[in-house]
Image: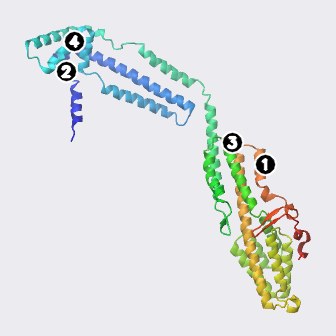
Amino acid sequence: MNFNWVKNVKKTHHRYNWPGRELDQALRPLARRVTLRYWLESARLALLWGLAGLGAVLVLLRLYPAFSPLIALVVGGAVVLAVGLLRFYRRPDALAVVRVVDELGLNGEAVTAFRLLETGAGDPWSREALNKGMAACAHFARGEQSRYPAVSRWRSWRDLALLAAVLLVLQVVPDHLGSYWAERKVEQQAMQAAAREARLAVEQIKDLKVNGENILPEEVRQKLSDLPREVAQAGDRNEAVAKLERARWELDGARAVIDPSARRDIQRLAEAWGSVDGQEWQNMAQALRSGEEEDIQKAMQELVQKMQADGDEPNLELAAAMFASAGMVENPALRKSLRDTAGAALSSGSSAGQSGDGSNPSQGDQNLAAAANSLADTLAGGAATASAGGALGSASSSLASVAQSLSGAGAAGAGTQLAGNTAGTGDNSGSNSGGNTVGAAGTSSGGTNSGGAHGPGET
């Protein structure tokens, strides 16, 4: 085991021991003056470097207030403590006092006596040199220690006073960057709040699925996942607003790809069927409003079974309702499914002569059930598409609202939010004029909706 550190400690402690009592007593007044000067100089250096560290941190705080002003006091105190510990470790020992005596005029006689006392004077020449050195030290101690003042140069303390004055002025001078950093802090807090709101909006739609498939492309979903972090880390408010706007336009673009008319079609059918007498029709309307596939399938099955059980007249009512509904919707696939169900309802339960195709009632019932199942699937897909479109529209509106509140643009922000909702709140003229209609099971581009023009009488 290495005990060198123990030897070093003993050696350091031995430095402060005098080899002879006579030399210690002779130079004790000077030793006190040397120690006083050393500690005064240590105090000056500790204060000087402590104030310098304090001032440096205060200047950094004005340029970039990234931490509390108390850190400046901590840094200044740490510097003072470090300088104090260093000066304590290097405090003057007995040999340092002897060297001061030689510098003041003894010309080596004091250090000669010190070394001879340590090693011993065994020969006459050494004893003569020791006696001469001791006599010189005794003569010096009787009055010449005043030649070694406690403060060597008062001008060195001027630097400390100047630095303290600069720090005082620094506290009095107005901080012109303070208002900027205050605004910057408010801006950062606003962007953090916007990032939290954007995260809530994104989490509701980034994994949105219709028929088991994500409605948003992988690239768009990745951008939406990164949106909260990008908003929080934006350079300024305008950059964060721009990122929110780009994300909103991505959502509007994705919303335009799915059927923009699905929501209107489902709402129209729910209102129309909800006004028909009969619990089955009410259940069907409620299922459409809920958008649940199982509820729609169950309600459609109950409706068809009820009509088949009651005979021909309910089948005619079902056919009329389906034909009328076909004239209300914009989606061509849904319109075709409604017409097919209406045709199957007309043929169900009729005689072969009445139907004109030779089918028996059992075959007609089977055709009606198949058409109803197909219609239920189409309605479920439309409801899911409408729900997804509504979720995208809600998220787009949320992002627009966040961007508006972040930018503080007032009316301009409101206009932006209105633009984000155009895809879902536009007028219904698209159902009667040329345009693009994307459905759950097909796409119709251009043309005129004759079903909307002619109503339930269209076949």
Tell me where residue 271 appears, x and y as whole percent. 81, 70
Q: Secondary structure at mark 3?
A: helix
The residue wearing badge 2 is 18
Q: Amino acid at mark 1?
A: Gly
Q: Residue at x 63, y 51 (%)?
A: 227
- Residues 351 and 401: in front is 351
CA gap between label 2 and label 4 equals 17 Å
Quarter-wise, where is residue 302 in the image?
Answer: bottom right
Image mark for residue 108: 4
Image height of 104 relative to 412, above or below: above
In percent of the image, x 67 and y 42: which residue is there? 237
Callout 3 touching callout 1 (CB < 8 Å): no
Look at label 4 and name its amino acid.
Gly
Task: Please rate how many residues cluster around mark 2, counting C-alpha atoms within 10 Å: few if below 14, some from 14 to 19, many from 20.
Answer: some
Q: CA distance from mark 3 to mark 1?
A: 17 Å
Identity, as a three-letter code, of the amino acid under mark 2: Trp
Q: Please tell me whether mark 2 sits on a helix, a strand or a loop.
A: loop
**Element carrying mark 1:** helix
CA gap between label 2 and label 3 equals 75 Å
Tell me residue 267's x, y (percent).
79, 67
The spot of residue 300 in percent (x, y) is 75, 78
Q: Is residue 426 visible?
A: yes
Residue denoted by label 3: 238
- Which one is in front in this view, the residue at disc 2 or the one at disc 1? 1
Mark 2 and mark 1 residues within 8 Å of each other at the beta carbon: no
Q: Is residue 287 visible?
A: no
Find out whether the residues at labels 2 and 3 contact each other: C-beta distance under 8 Å.
Answer: no
The label on residue 415 is: 1
- Which residue is more in the foreground, 121 or 189? 121
